[in-house]
């Protein structure tokens, strides 16, 4: 039996506050983890029947978050995937992929941004060592 790992959440534009839905509208099946700070996942949406279905390349344009992604790409702003328990991932890309049987689906590339204290050589915003 294959053990599949999912994270549940929602897409948020850089300027949006968390919405905390009761049932997360999106699910990501983790397919690959190139590093501890990166993940690639197959994208699922919550249907009106309250189950998750894969997003197809043809259906992706029906979702407002896809428009948000396109706008953020054009404007150079950030789009995040906020996981169910508050963990935020930066959306690097959305693209079409296919499985071994040739079934097309939408995949998303996510990464965690390093905290400023790490990227500033171990110093916090006040300039003192962390």
Image: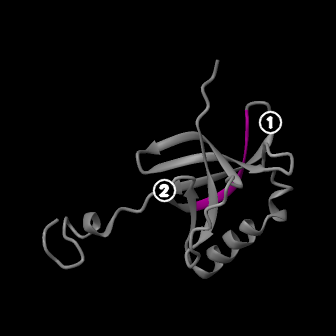
Q: Could you give the CA–CA distance between mark 2 and mark 1, rounded to whole angstroms?
A: 32 Å
Quadrant of the snapshot with the C terminus: bottom left
Q: In which image quadrant can residue 59 be found?
A: bottom right
Q: Which label was assigned to residue 87?
A: 2
The residue sitting at 13% across, 74% down in the picture is: 128
Q: Residue at x 56, y 74 (%)?
A: 17
Front-lying residue, 74 or 86 = 86
Q: Is 92 displayed left or right of 114 in the figure?
A: right
Q: Earlier in the sequence, mark 2 or mark 1?
A: 2
Counting from the top left corner in percent of width and height, residue 10 is at 64, 59
Helix, strand or loop for disc 1: loop
Q: Determine whether the residue tagged by mark 2 lies in a helix, strand or loop.
A: loop
| Percent coordinates x, y for residue 105 in the rendering | 76, 46
**Which residue sits furthest front?**
22
Task: Identify the residue at image location x=36%, y=62%.
Answer: 114
- What main secondary structure does the magenta stretch of the protein show? strand
Q: Is residue 36 above or below residue 101?
A: below
> Outermost residue toward the left?
129
**Quick check: is 25 in the magenta stretch?**
no
The local crowd at label 2, few if under 14, some if 14 to 19, many if 20 or more residues have their Cα within 10 Å, is few
Residue furthest toward the top? 1
Marks 2 and 1: CB-CB under 8 Å?
no
Work out whether 51 lies above or below 114. Answer: above
Q: Which numbered marker is on residue 102?
A: 1
Magenta segment range? 92-99
**Percent position (x, y) of residue 1?**
64, 17
């Amino acid at each position: 039996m294959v053990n599949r790992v999912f994270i549940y959440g929602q897409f948020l534009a850089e300027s949006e506050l968390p919405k905390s839905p009761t049932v997360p509208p999106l699910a990501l099946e983790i397919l690959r983890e190139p590093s501890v700070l990166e993940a690639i996942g197959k994208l699922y949406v919550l249907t009106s029947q309250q189950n998750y279905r894969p997003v197809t390349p043809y259906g992706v344009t029906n979702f407002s978050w896809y428009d948000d992604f396109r706008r953020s790409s054009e404007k150079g702003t950030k789009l995040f995937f906020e996981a169910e328990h508050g963990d935020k991932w930066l959306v690097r890309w959305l693209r079409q992929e296919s499985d071994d049987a040739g079934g097309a689906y939408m995949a998303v590339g996510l990464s965690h941004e390093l905290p400023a204290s790490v990227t500033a050589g171990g110093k916090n915003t006040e300039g003192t060592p962390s």
